[in-house]
Image: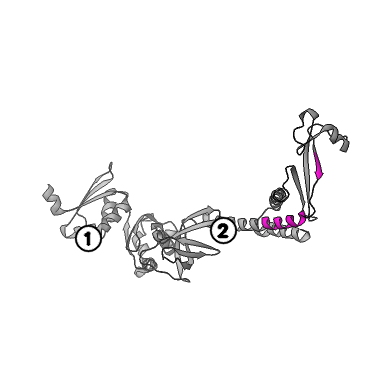
C-alpha cells in the first residue's frame, strides 16, 4: 500500500464513481475485522489507515474510570494509572496504545485488495442495475447466449449481462440458437446478492405495443394511441387504436403503405395474426369492433355489470367465437367486458 495504491483509489473514484473516502472507511472496517479474526483481541481497538503513506496502525482504546468503577482491564483504566502516562487525563477520556502486530502489514494489504475488488464488483452491479431499471418495460435487441439443456430457458446477452427468458415468456414454437439476434421486452429487473437479475419476454402483450411504437411514427409522436392489447402469443393479437387527429386513420397508420408496417411486426412475431380495431368510448361500439372480423347484428350492454350480449348472424357464430373460443376470449380481454355471443336463431328460440 503506497503511492500506487492512492492512484488506484483516485482512478476508481473517477472511472467508476466509487467515493474514495467511503472506500477508505470500508477498508478500515475490514481491517478491524481482520485484526480481531487473526489476533483474537478482546480489546476495543481503532484502525488508523493512512493511504498516503501506505501505513496501517492499530491502537487499543481504554476508557479512564474511577478506581471504584473499574470492571474490565481490557476496556478500562484507572485514573491514577492513566495520569502516570499523562497527567492531563480526566475521567471519561480514552487512552490509546499502539498494538500493531509485526506481520499485520501483509494481512492489511490482502484485506485492502479484497475490499477494493469487492467494491468494484458492487459498483459494476449497481451501474448495470441502474442502466436496466430505466429500461424496464422497454423493447431491446439482444443476442442469444445459450439455451438451457432442457430447452426451457433462453439466456439473452444484453451488453455485459445475461437476461433470462423462461418458458412462460417465450412464444410457443419459437426456437433459438446461440448467436441469434432477438428483440425482447424487459419484463422485470431485480437486485440480488449475485447482481442484477433481468427477466425478458416475447409473449407479453406489451411486446406488440413496443414493436408498433418503433415502426409507426404516428404512435411514437403520440398522434395515434394504442388503447389496449390482448394477446395469445404465437397465435393471435388484438389491438385497439385511436387517433387524436381526425385526419389520420389509426388503423391505416398501423397497417402502413401496402401493409409494410404491420408486416414487419407479424414477421418479427413469426407470423402471429394481428387484428387492429378502432377504439371507442362507446362500449357497444367497442365490443362490436373487438369481435372483428365477425359481423354483428346488435349489442345490448349492461354498464353496471360491464357485460354485453352480442347477436351475430347464424353463419358468423363460429367466426365470432373463434377456434376454441379464441376470438371471443381476446375480445373480452381487449375490452375488459364480459361478452356473451348468440346467433340470431338462438336469440329467437329463447324469445
Q: Which residues are magenta?
A: 95-115
Mark closest to the chain's N terminus, 1 or 2 = 2
Q: Can residue 193 be seen from the camera position used here?
A: yes
Counting from the top left corner in percent of width and height, residue 253 is at 37, 62
- Identify which residue is drawn at 70% across, 53% down: 20
On screen, residue 121 versus residue 343, left or right, reads right
Q: Is residue 304 above or below residue 114?
A: above
CA neighbours of label 1 inside 10 A, class few (<14), some (14 to 19), many (20+): some
Counting from the top left corner in percent of width and height, residue 209 is at 40, 59
Q: Is residue 266 above or below residue 278?
A: below
Cα distance between the residues tagged 1 and 2:
48 Å
Q: Is residue 270 above or below residue 118?
A: below
**Label 1 SS:** helix
**Residue beneath disc 1:** 319
**Residue beneath disc 2:** 128
Q: Can residue 88 be seen from the camera position used here?
A: no
- Identify which residue is drawn at 34% across, 65% down: 272
Counting from the top left corner in percent of width and height, residue 344 is at 15, 53
On screen, residue 91 versus residue 212, left or right, reads right
Amino acid at each position: 500500500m503506497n503511492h500506487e495504491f492512492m492512484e488506484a483509489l483516485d482512478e476508481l473514484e473517477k472511472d467508476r464513481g466509487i467515493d474514495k473516502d467511503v472506500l477508505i472507511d470500508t477498508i478500515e472496517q475490514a481491517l478491524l475485522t481482520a485484526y480481531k479474526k487473526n489476533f483474537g483481541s478482546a480489546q476495543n481497538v481503532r484502525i488508523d489507515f493512512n493511504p498516503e503513506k501506505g501505513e496501517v496502525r492499530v491502537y487499543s482504546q481504554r476508557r479512564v474510570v474511577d478506581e471504584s468503577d473499574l470492571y474490565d482491564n481490557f476496556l478500562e483504566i484507572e485514573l491514577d494509572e492513566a495520569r502516570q502516562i499523562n497527567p492531563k487525563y480526566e475521567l471519561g477520556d480514552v487512552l490509546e496504545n499502539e498494538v500493531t502486530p509485526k506481520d499485520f502489514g501483509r494481512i492489511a494489504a490482502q484485506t485492502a485488495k479484497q475490499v477494493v475488488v469487492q467494491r468494484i464488483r458492487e459498483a459494476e452491479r449497481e451501474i448495470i442495475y441502474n442502466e436496466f431499471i430505466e429500461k424496464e418495460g422497454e423493447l431491446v435487441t439482444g443476442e442469444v447466449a445459450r439455451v438451457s439443456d432442457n430447452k426451457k430457458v433462453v439466456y439473452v446477452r444484453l451488453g455485459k449481462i445475461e437476461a433470462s427468458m423462461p418458458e412462460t415468456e417465450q412464444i410457443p414454437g419459437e426456437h433459438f440458437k446461440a448467436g441469434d439476434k432477438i428483440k425482447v421486452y424487459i419484463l422485470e429487473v431485480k437486485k440480488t446478492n449475485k447482481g442484477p437479475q433481468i427477466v425478458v419476454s416475447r409473449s407479453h402483450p406489451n411486446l406488440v405495443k413496443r414493436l408498433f411504437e418503433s415502426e409507426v411514427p404516428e404512435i411514437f409522436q403520440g398522434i395515434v394511441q394504442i388503447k389496449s392489447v390482448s394477446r395469445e402469443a404465437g397465435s393471435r393479437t388484438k389491438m385497439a387504436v385511436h387517433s387524436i387527429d381526425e385526419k389520420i386513420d389509426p388503423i391505416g397508420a398501423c397497417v402502413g403503405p401496402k401493409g409494410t408496417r404491420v408486416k414487419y411486426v407479424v414477421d418479427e412475431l413469426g407470423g402471429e395474426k394481428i387484428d387492429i380495431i378502432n377504439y371507442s368510448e362507446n362500449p357497444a361500439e367497442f365490443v362490436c369492433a373487438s369481435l372483428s372480423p365477425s359481423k354483428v347484428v346488435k349489442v345490448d350492454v349492461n354498464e353496471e355489470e360491464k357485460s354485453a350480449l352480442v347477436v351475430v348472424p347464424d353463419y358468423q357464430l363460429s367466426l365470432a367465437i373463434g377456434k376454441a373460443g379464441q376470438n371471443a376470449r381476446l375480445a373480452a380481454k381487449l375490452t375488459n367486458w364480459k361478452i356473451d355471443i348468440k346467433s340470431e336463431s338462438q336469440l329467437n328460440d329463447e324469445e
